[in-house]
Image: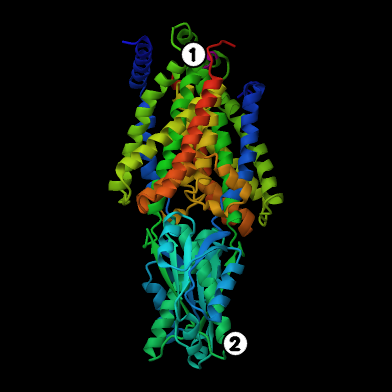
Amino acid sequence: MNLLHIFSLARKEFLTLMRDKRSRIIIIVPPIVQLFIFGFAATYDLNDVPVAVYNEDSGGASRELLARIEGSPHFSVLYKISSDDEVASLIDDRKVLLVIRPGQNFSANLQRGAPASLQLIIDGRNSNTAMIAMNYLRDVVLDFNHEWQQEHGKTGPPVQLKMRAWYNENLQSQWFIVPGIVGSLMLVVTLLVTALSVAREREQGTFDQLLVTPLRPVEILIGKAIPGIVIGLLEATLIIALMVWFFDIPLRGSIPALYLGILLFLVATVGVGLMISSICTTQQQAILGAFLFIVPAVVLSGFTTPIANMPEMVQWLTYLDPLRYFLVIVRGVTLEGDGFILLFHQFWPMVIIGMVTLGLAGWLFRYRMY
Amino acid sequence: MNARLHRLWGMIRKESLQILRDPSSISIAFVMPVMLLLLFGYGVSLDAKNIPLGIVIEQPDTAAQSLAGAFDRSEFFRPQRFAAIQDAKRALTERRIDGILWLRNDFSNRLLSGGEAPVGVFVNGVDSNQANITRGYIQGAWLAWLQHFATSRGQALDLPVVLEQRVWFNPALSSHLFLVPGLIAIIMTMIGSLLTAMVVAREWERGTMETLMVTPLHMGEMLVGKLIPYFMLGMGGMLLSVAMALFLFDVPLLGPFWLLILCSALFMLVSLAIGLLISIVTRNQFLAGQVALVVSFLPSFLLSGFLFDIHSMPSWVQLITYLVPARYFVAILQTLFLAGPVWPVVLTNVAAMLLMLLILTALVVKKSYKRLD
């Protein structure tokens, strides 16, 4: 292996990527813009859910409970209605997500010690949002019950749950999603940089020229891999810095472990990118190939929906996805404070993915001729 | 025959032949939606089942066993017993379980002496949404057990306020009923913009654009001639996805089929126009592909309201979501499939898509001219 060969090829690759102003921009600007937009957009937490109140009760207790709901940052009461017909149109037209309806004798029942019913009518079109809103309301009602019982000298339910969340103590969605965005953006950038590199040369016929130079396939492979890894490392450092300082995500674990994870992840994705690139003969095919890898890789990585909920067959597929391992590493280091030992089982699968894909890419350089 | 129609027909024929001879466009239009819908339909789910839950019972007597039994019977949990809290905490750190239920050794004493017996609950909060759902299920199992415990001792459970929940449109709260229709919007956004993004860019790169320029074709005829075959392809993929949603994923379609197809056609035109605009502006396949990827996949995945509630986003992000065409189509799809033809929802979103199409067409016309640079 000749280091000079590798270095000159890597230099040429950097120049092709960076010479064109538009392609320079597309590598740097979209990831940062996307981190900001998605970092704020992608949240499962609900704020200001539009609510309508249909109060048939005239007592003070229902007013007190409704005041608590109005006071919560999760809900904003937009409509007060007084007939059954309005319920359907408000919910159908998506003007409100839920209608809260204290029963006719709510306050009276409460005073007598009989169960007072609070009816909820929820738009289930987005079942997850509906479930979260119900959980918020249940918390409000449980708090209300607890205080009511204390004020009236009654004992509460015989068993009390004392809940605590680990690692993400206030259960903020942002803490979960932003590290996921970091991983997804790195995947997109490195794949776009590498997937087109060989295909473009094949389409333009310069790859044949490269093959007749004294460069050996291994040297071509390394020279083509270096730009993706270097750009990925710089980009990762930048977006992780933004994540920590701008989004206030804690960084509780070992930073060397995080960087080892980044490096292995980049090797694995660059390997996938080069493999796609060397299979394809045109840029269009390469773009398609990158697309066909990126989309499932993001969706099946556990970025937004848990892998544990997938059917077993799909769960097996996720083991082929380097992003799956990397997301555990990023979340492990940032939130859970993990180090090398707890993350060991995330490191080695990426090494295997990288070795297999890079090996295949190198083999294809030599044996796939057009 | 009118010369204009004749020229247009020639263009359509040329594009159709090109599509038929290069299998990549056909595979984008037909293979991709099937593959992605299968993968996502099964892969994207928010329904937690068999949550691994560690139960620590320090003194296994009947009362403690009966509370733990409520979790054993729930379909949401897959409980594992631990002898000591330290073991359970280690399992939580190593991600082997997602939560812990901790009954201390004075649990039964405090319960039977009429006091309030505390039960410690820890959940792994990293995935906050999953943690919230787990918390809700734990509360549900707890309330059910309280009820059972009170009846077994001949008492009524004394709860001042009782929640009665009625969920419309999706009473079982199964997430695939809303995720699958939303996925159709995302998949078709990608396919529509990807299909056309590369088309004009390729003509520029290969130099065949110059050949087309010396023909008597007008720019408008050329664009329409290119769009029609791809529109047919895209609609084919769309029909395939709808059929899969209905027959494979068993999502009910409450709205009329013709309205669904009409809205889909409008959405397809918007996505194709976005792709066309990208390819006219970039004139380069590398850039066109990258831009198409950047503007279609993640924005429609995260900003369309398909997964994340748009109301809860900060208002400046909500403004950005108005630029994402999938936002309108997701609203239409979720409503048409699960709620039926709710005209106010359908019409406002159709109007928004029409406006988008108009602006995009104006931009395409403005940017496309027969000139060599």
Identify the chain of the residue marked 1, using the numbered disc in the image: B
Single out the residue that lies furthest toward the right: A245
Image position of A32 with respect to A365: above or below? below
Q: Residue at x 47, y 73 (%)?
A: B139
Amino acid type of the residue that numbered disc 1 sits on in the rendered structure:
Arg
Is residue A31 covered in magenta?
no
Q: Which mark is residue B206?
A: 1
Q: Are marks 2 and 1 on the same chain?
A: no
Q: What percent of the width, then of the height, locates residue A71?
A: 61, 68
- Where residue B36 appears, as percent x and y from the top left, is 39, 40
Describe the colour scheme in one phrase: rainbow
* Residue B44 x, y percent position in the rendering: 43, 50
Q: Is residue B121 left or right of residue B143?
A: right
Q: Residues within 10 Å of mark 1 (few under 14, many from 20)?
A: few
Q: Quadrant of residue B137?
A: bottom left
Name the residue at the top extreme: B214
Quadrant of the image containing the C terminus of chain B: top right
Main SS of the magenta segment? helix
A206 is within the stretch colored magenta = yes
Residue at image position (59%, 87%) is A151
The amino acid pointed to by label 2 is Glu
Q: Nearer the viewer, residue B66 or B322?
A: B322
- Decide: is B232 above or below B304: above
Name the residue at 47% across, 63% down: A98
Q: Where are the magenta residues, as a range?
A: A205-209
Locate the N terminus of chain B and report the quarter of the image it occupies: top left
Q: Which residue is mark 2?
A: A151
- Numbered disc in front, either 2 or 1: 2
From what the image shows, is residue A38 above or below residue B228? below
